Image (cartoon, helix red, strand yellow):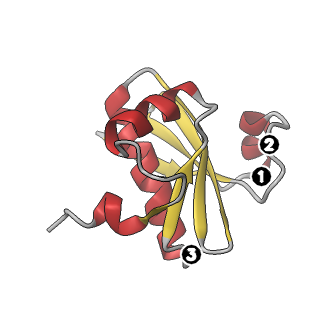
Amino acid sequence: MIAMRPILEQDVIDLLNNGRFEDEIDGYVIMNGAEYLGYALYCVQDGCTTVLACETQSNALVDGAVRACVAAGENAGADRFCVNKEDQALAKWASVFLHGAKEVVPNGELFGHCT
């Protein structure tokens, strides 16, 4: 079963971040049981979740990782999100799911169709 597990150890976040981003970073590792499938990093600032990086081999897992990051941001009080389009996987995701939307998107655009 695929799971998005929050990264609780700062050393792991620092290793995956590798000095790329300077904000207070959180993240998820993507697992299938004991099998590591990738990760996603995000930050929450001023009511906005920014998905910073996502590394996995599956487009479906990128979608799940973005949604997990945005949901975590929403739980922390963010009502909008954006993705780092310099990250190839996130840029591809945005071209499919955001359809040319502005840089910052209300969370409802991602979750509003869920019933």
Query: Residue 71: percent from the left, percent from the top?
Result: 44, 64
Q: Secondary structure at mark 3?
A: loop
Quadrant of the image occupied by residue 16: top right
> Which quarter shows the C terminus?
bottom left
Is residue 65 depicted above or below 47 in this figure? above
Q: Are marks 2 and 1 in contact (CB under 8 Å)?
A: yes
What is the three-letter code of the residue carrying label 3? Ala
Q: CA distance from mark 2 to mark 1?
A: 6 Å
Which residue is under mark 1? 10
Residue at the spot 56% in from the left edge and 75% down from the top edge: 76
Query: Residue 29: percent from the left, percent from the top?
Result: 54, 41
Which residue is under mark 2? 14
Question: Which-is-in-front pick, marks 2 and 3?
Answer: 3
Is residue 112 depicted above or below 51 in this figure? below
Left or right position of 49 against 37? right
What is the three-letter code of the residue carrying label 2? Asp
Residue at the spot 55% in from the left edge and 79% down from the top edge: 77
Q: Secondary structure at mark 1?
A: helix
Which residue is under mark 3? 76
What is the three-letter code of the residue carrying label 1? Gln
